[in-house]
Image (cartoon, rainbow, N blue to C red):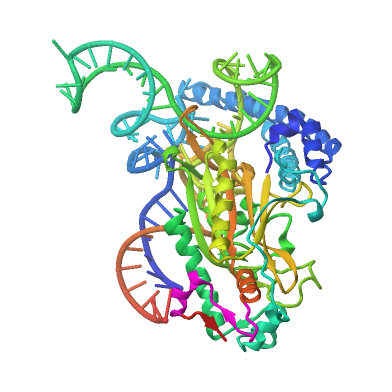
RNA sequence: GGAGAGGUGGCCGAGUGGCCGAAGGCGCUCCCCUGCUAAGGGAGUAUAGGGUUUAUAGCUCUAUCGAGGGUUCGAAUCCCUCCCUCUCCGCCA
């Protein structure tokens, strides 16, 4: 959520910055509502002040043993008028906040102009795509050849966009999770965290998935008696970042660095026909997520660091990748700046997203009321939040299958995973 | 599932209809005193929003005592619903 002050003071400037990401701010509608709000709020507050002062004098008169009948007559009817004003004001404020909740974040100055992914800027590359002296397979063919990756069984059990893994492949999948968690907690200083996979709507509003993107989420049917509503998490970002919702952090406790492994559930509504083959786009996948909660002045440095932490995993696995600075038109709703890590997939002869690292600045923090006490002002101020995948496990497995395949249809085990695989150096 | 007790500021904790945005304590900030340390004295110290202001400060108004409704001229306090925490019993991976 953006600061409401921007809408009162710099709405044109704000609209211009939002236009960069292709979002058209309806300034006339907002200005009109703002004007109405101002009048209504002033009037309502004046009435409240009147009621308060008159009620006070009634109290005094009563204590002094005076006749309060004439005073009661004065406030007669005030309550009803006030109630009407309060109601219209609250309706108007809800209308305004509903608009505000759907306005995306403002892109950072360092975010390049552009409309879509074609305008993203390559920042750097690491590693050389290998050349193969045999006909290479994609991960689906390799996995099926190993007899360890099965989509048909998953269709039977659940439906499309699910998979089953077995044997060494299932183990490598788990090994990846262990390796990533260990590296981030032992080497990069993140605090390993276990979180709920079912969350409430407040949490999703906090990180920005709601109200705008409900169709992307799996929703658990509302509990009949309690009316309790749960959503399956689309990313660990939601439960982990919401750890600091409604809190005031001490300056000396910042930055907070969390790492969590969770499954992620996405409806993929609107991506029919995209990546239907293979495990690139699934309804359920595992991810190791990095989240940082930092002082505002540190957030852009923290984004660089966090991105490097995700890159370290790719480097350890010796997987070639490139880093993209997403253009204004391609960054996510809540993001102020995003780096995507794209890993080389020989089977597709292309780089594919395997991690997305974003600085949200105070956008999520404002929605969450996540604050810290700034020693300079001694006031609570909004923190900045950063997160990134470190990494998407399924896609990492895909890239290992494709990059580490051998001429005889087997797959080498990356060196750093071997100790997690009982010393195995090759599977198949 | 049954029975009970609670939810108040950064923290602890008082407050059962009116000068209560909230005593007291802790913590924190500033000042004084003390030649170090320890201790003592004084003052200040919630958040959000509106108005005023070029803006900040200031001033002022409003809201907020788990959340939402209600009663009342007036609610932290009374009533209703919900959420959460704790204790005991039962059940359970």
Tell me which corner region of the image, top left, top right, bottom left or bottom right, holds residue B32. top left
Q: Is residue A254 above or below residue A353?
A: above
| Residue at x 48%, y 58% (from the top left corner) | A184
Q: Write the start and end of the magenta stretch as one range.
A: A405-423
| Residue at x 56%, y 61% (from the top left corner) | A315
Q: Nearer the viewer, residue A37 or A105?
A: A105
Give x and y (percent) for residue A246.
Answer: 52, 46
Q: Is residue A149 above or below residue B80?
A: below
Tell me which corner region of the image, top left, top right, bottom left or bottom right, holds residue A267. bottom right
Residue A262 part of the magenta-drawn span:
no
The number of callouts visible is 0
Give x and y (percent) for residue A10.
Answer: 76, 29
Q: Is residue A413 above or below residue A52?
A: below
Residue A301 lies left or right of residue B78; in this view the side is: right
Q: Nearer the viewer, residue A338 or A396?
A: A396
Give x and y (percent) for residue B43.
Answer: 37, 17
Give x and y (percent) for residue A363.
Answer: 64, 44
Extreme residue toward the front, this view: A133
Residue A312 lies left or right of residue A398; in this view the side is: left
Residue A412 part of the magenta-drawn span:
yes
């Amino acid at each position: 959520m953006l600061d409401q002050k921007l809408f009162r003071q710099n709405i044109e400037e704000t609209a211009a910055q939002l236009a960069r990401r292709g979002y058209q701010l309806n300034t006339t509608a907002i200005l009109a509502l703002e004007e109405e709000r101002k009048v209504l709020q002033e009037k309502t507050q004046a009435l409240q002040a009147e009621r308060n002062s008159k009620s006070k004098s009634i109290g005094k008169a009563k204590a002094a043993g005076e006749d309060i009948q004439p005073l009661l007559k004065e406030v007669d009817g005030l309550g009803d008028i006030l109630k009407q004003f309060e109601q219209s004001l609250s309706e108007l404020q809800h209308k305004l906040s509903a608009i505000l909740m759907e306005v995306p974040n403002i892109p950072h100055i360092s975010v390049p102009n552009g409309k879509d992914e074609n305008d993203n800027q390559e920042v750097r590359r690491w590693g050389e795509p290998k050349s193969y002296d045999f006909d290479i397979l994609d991960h689906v063919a390799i996995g099926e050849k190993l007899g360890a990756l099965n989509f048909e069984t998953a269709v039977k059990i659940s439906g499309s966009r699910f998979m089953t893994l077995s044997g060494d492949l299932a183990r490598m999948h788990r090994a990846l999770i262990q390796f990533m968690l260990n590296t981030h907690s032992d080497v990069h200083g993140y605090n390993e965290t276990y979180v709920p996979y079912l969350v409430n709507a407040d949490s999703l509003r906090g990180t920005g998935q709601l109200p705008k993107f409900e169709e992307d989420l799996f929703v658990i049917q509302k509990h009949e008696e309690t009316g309790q509503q749960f959503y399956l998490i689309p990313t660990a970002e939601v439960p982990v970042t919401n750890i600091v919702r409604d809190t005031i952090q001490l300056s000396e406790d910042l930055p907070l660095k969390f790492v969590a492994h969770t499954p992620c559930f996405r409806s993929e509504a609107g991506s029919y026909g995209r990546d239907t083959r293979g495990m690139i786009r699934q309804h359920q996948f595992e991810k190791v997520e990095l989240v940082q909660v930092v002082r505002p002045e540190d957030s852009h440095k923290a984004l660089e660091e966090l991105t490097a932490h995700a890159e370290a995993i790719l480097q350890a696995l010796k997987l070639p990748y490139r880093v993209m600075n997403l253009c204004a038109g391609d960054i996510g709703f809540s993001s102020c700046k995003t780096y995507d890590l794209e890993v080389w997939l020989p089977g597709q002869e292309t780089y594919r997203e395997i991690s997305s690292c974003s600085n949200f600045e105070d956008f999520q923090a404002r929605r969450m009321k996540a604050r810290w006490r700034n020693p300079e002002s001694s006031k609570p101020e909004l923190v900045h939040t950063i997160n990134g995948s470190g990494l998407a496990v399924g896609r990492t497995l895909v890239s290992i299958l494709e990059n580490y395949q051998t001429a005889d249809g087997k797959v080498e085990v990356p060196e750093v995973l071997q100790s997690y695989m009982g010393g195995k150096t090759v599977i198949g």
